[in-house]
Image (spheres, helix red, strand yellow):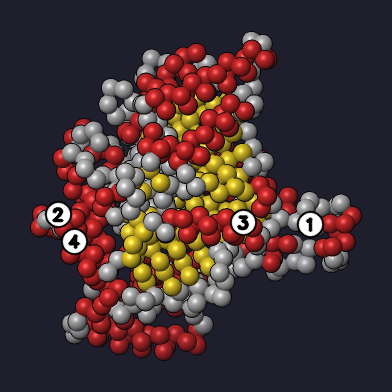
Amino acid sequence: MAAAGAPALWRRLSALLPRGARPGLAALLGRLADRLSRGRDRRARRSSWLLLAPLLTPAVPLLTSPPCCLCPEGAHRFQWIRNVVPEFGISSSHVKVLSSPTEFYELLKAQIKAAKQRVVMASLYLGTGFLEQELVDCLEEMLDGSLQASGSSSDLRVSILLDFTRGSRGRKNSRTMLLPLLRRFPEQVRVSLFHTPNLRGLLRLLIPERFNETIGLQHIKVYLFDDNVILSGANLSDSYFTNRQDRYILLRDSPEIADFFTELVNAIGDVSLQLQEDDTVQMIEGMVHPYQGDKITYCEMANKRVMEVINSARTRQEFLHAETFHSSQGDHCFSQQDLYASGDVKPKPDTWVYPLIQMKPFGIQIDEMVTETLLTEAERGARVYLTTGYFNLTQAYMDLILGTRAEYQILLASPEVNGFFGAKGVAGAIPAAYVYIEHQFYNEVCCLGQQERVRLQEYFRNGWTFHAKGLWLYLAGSTLPCLTLIGSPNFGYRSVHRDLEAQVAIVTENRDLQHQLHQEQEQLYLRSGMVSPSTFEQPSRYVKLWVKLVTPLIKNFF
């Protein structure tokens, strides 16, 4: 293993170091390979490679140009992200952090009713209960009102993106919920159903319903109304509106961000199956079919459509940045105070939003690269609060957490609040599988003597389930977070390799918004208990032998 991996490791590391340092690196790798080949104990092997974890992740992208005295963005240390994705500078007064499922649901209804130009909703699925029907009724009322106000036609458009397999499950499903809208407003409503290109041929015929969802899904969650955007990990289902804890952030009056996510959802919609009025599906003319057409051609086409959205938005934002801060200024550096006083530029932004997209089936790995770099760059004394409803970190994320210097507090679901708790059949064993994965990781932490630096906490709330995901970063010496990640990824294998995911990095210098984010983090962690060796001695943490044997084989599917 070591001998085979050393050449690749050498190439990766040497690219990051000056030429003069490479002989020493080669000698170090040689010694490590020799130690590994001699069969040192597992702890020694793990520790040796973890020392190199910060070097194994992508280097921070170099700035394309030096910071400019006219640019307020130069004030924060995360501006390197704008070299791979568009950067949206906004005022913190446009950002609102929500805390409860009920608040999320009421906001959805209010935003739908107030929409005048567009409604764009991307989710895994739409549920079939009373609360979901009330959402559909709000959409119908809004569309009906727009037609009455404008006569025979309306410019208002509704675009809904769901997953094909999850949205087609059962006789009553997301498709049947939306068919009345599609039939009544065929010119205004579009329902796109993404089908993973990896579920095809004999595999598609043999894998039964529900299990076919393990191959890959449309997992993005974004809810957009005119120029207001809600970013969340929550789906459009009754539990997410009542007693399933998630995270939610509203970006108000943010037209550039709304345009970006509209274009992104439309791009994915263009390579998805289109729901028809008779409940059949078909592709847009000229588009390659996801499971009947050539897989490579389809993925290349999808990559091109999505990257066009990302690159065109990045170009637009760079142009807007240049126009706002550089137009008619020549090469001279005037004071920002003079520029703002003159009214020649927009009010100075204090918050920046970066959309991070992960679509490994299409060869797009932006979120993975940025997340790994953030974990790599977190310095000693920094604190990272990371939460996921399904604790199943990728090996790269685990190695970085265990091999870097920042303090980590990881919040995960106790078995009782896992979404699969009490499920029938094989799915009922999934919480136990997560306990087994958690226990293995905790043992790694203990073996490396890092219990004080890396802590696990289990969320519990009676009668609730837990689905929150994301990250808060506190710089060394700071009591408030300056960055958060929020969206659909769970930091696991599925999120990185199988599903379509999107989240945003929000960086802020505003103390009020930092307090909002800190309060959000505290409210979630206050309902948790610290994991210790005694945690796994509880009866609810008992894992059957067959689950332990099967989990390593199937952990990449959930």
Is residue 287 in sight in this rendering? no
Q: For this view, does 132 lie left or right of residue 261?
A: left
Residue lying farthest to the front in this orientation:
462
Sequence-wise, which precedes: disc 3 or disc 2? 3
Decide: marks 3, 1 in contact (CB < 8 A)?
A: no
Sequence-wise, which precedes: disc 4 or disc 2? 4
Frontmost residue, 378 versus 357:
378
Give the distance between the C-alpha atoms of the residues marked 2 and 1, in whole angstroms: 59 Å
Residue lying farthest to the left in this orientation:
545
Circle 4 residue: 538
Decide: marks 2, 1 in contact (CB < 8 A)?
A: no
Circle 1 residue: 325
Q: Residue at x 29, y 79 (%)?
A: 448
Which amino acid, by three-letter code, is at mark 1?
Phe
Sequence-wise, which precedes: disc 2 or disc 1? 1
- Mark 3 or 1: the one toward you: 3
Q: For this view, does 6 lie left or right of residue 308?
A: left
Give the distance between the C-alpha atoms of the residues marked 4 and 2, in whole angstroms: 17 Å
Q: In the image, residue 176 lies at what x, y percent?
A: 37, 21
Residue 513 shows which numbered tag? 3
Residue 547 shows which numbered tag? 2
